Image (spheres, rainbow, N blue to C red):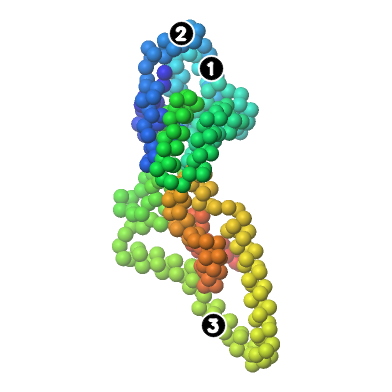
Amino acid sequence: ALDRRAIIDGAMFGYGVPIGSHFPPQSPDYIDLTGRYPYDLEAGRRLLAEAGYADGFTLRLKLPPQSYARRTGEVIAAQLAKLKIKVVIQNLEWPGWLDEVFARHDYDLTIVNHAEPFDYDIYGRSDYYFGYNSPAYRALLAQLQTASDPATRHGLLVDIQRKLADDAVNGFLFQFPRLGVQDARLQDVWINTPNQAIDFAAVNFGGAAGSDDASASEGATSGGWSVPILLVLLIGVAAALWRFGAPYVASRFGSFAATLLAATVVIFALIQVVPGDPAAYMMGLGATPQAIAALHAELGIAGSVPERYIAWVGGMLHGDFGISYVYRVPVAGLLADRFALSLP
């Protein structure tokens, strides 16, 4: 009953990729299942008659406030009307949608964009608002969580897509388009990010001048003030040696080193170890090991915990606090901007 191409043209101005399951077409593990339930009004009428609904019925379509949902809802209501299915549209504000649809499951139909990367694991939650409870599907997810062989993972991801399509868990419509407008000369734009933001952190207009400016800026924000600090420390140590003598300075330095070691270990554990793997969180629980490893390298968190700790301490000693997980820019630059605003 649902014509995906007509929905995309009518509600999304032609932008969007038809999908037949809950999986992104850009993934190498994607399979096209849009032909599993092709648009066929006659087949729809026949199936409704076999189910005892030849004269149709009424459904409530509760929509969140986003424009894509409101426009798509109008198109779908018109398409279902051809099968004598009356759709009563109820436009909700976002808190109302979260309460009635997401929390209390009080709806017949709804439309929403699921934007989290690789979030097919939500179909394994029997209490989720879809109302889907499949032990067979949960078994596939469990196998995927323990599989590391690429060929095995690919086969499981294909089975996951087919299972969702065969069970018709949802009416899968289209992949929501990510539209951005930028100068044609702009380079290094991150197109397929694991979040909804359009990331311009690493973009440039090319040319040596732009690269030199970027390098100079990065040096000034990340480690440019380490030399003056080192000089001040050396002067302080020399003054302490002259005033108190070497044994006293060595004793105090040992206490300082022990305190610094304990403090950095605790802080590193709290911000880098205890919260878990940020790359796995950003990419989704079903992301491939290769994708997570690539994001580890980009964020500077590759390697074992001891290796990361040593690199983290070494970076701090020369003013490099790493890369922001959110903004993808050096943290030192963000701190410098905020200090500049907070100073009188």
Q: Give percent across and percent down for residue 44.
A: 41, 14
SS class, disc 1: strand
Q: Is residue 166 above or below residue 320?
A: above
CB contact under 8 Å: marks 1 and 2: no
Q: Give percent across and percent down for residue 93.
A: 58, 31
Which numbered tag is attached to residue 49? 2
Which residue is located at x 39 percent, y 37 percent? Answer: 30
* Cα distance between the residues tagged 2 and 3: 86 Å
Q: Which residue is mark 3?
A: 231
SS class, disc 3: helix
* Cα distance between the residues tagged 1 and 3: 74 Å
Q: Tag 3: Cα neighbours inside 10 Å, few (<14), some, or many (≥20)? A: few
* Cα distance between the residues tagged 1 and 2: 17 Å
Q: Which residue is mark 1?
A: 59
Q: Is residue 51 left or right of residue 95?
A: left
Q: Is residue 251 above or below residue 98?
A: below
Q: Is residue 229 above or below residue 159?
A: below
Question: Camera-side residue: 9 or 311?
Answer: 311
**Quadrant of residue 241 in the image?**
bottom right
SS class, disc 2: helix
Q: Nearer the viewer, mark 1 or mark 2?
A: 2
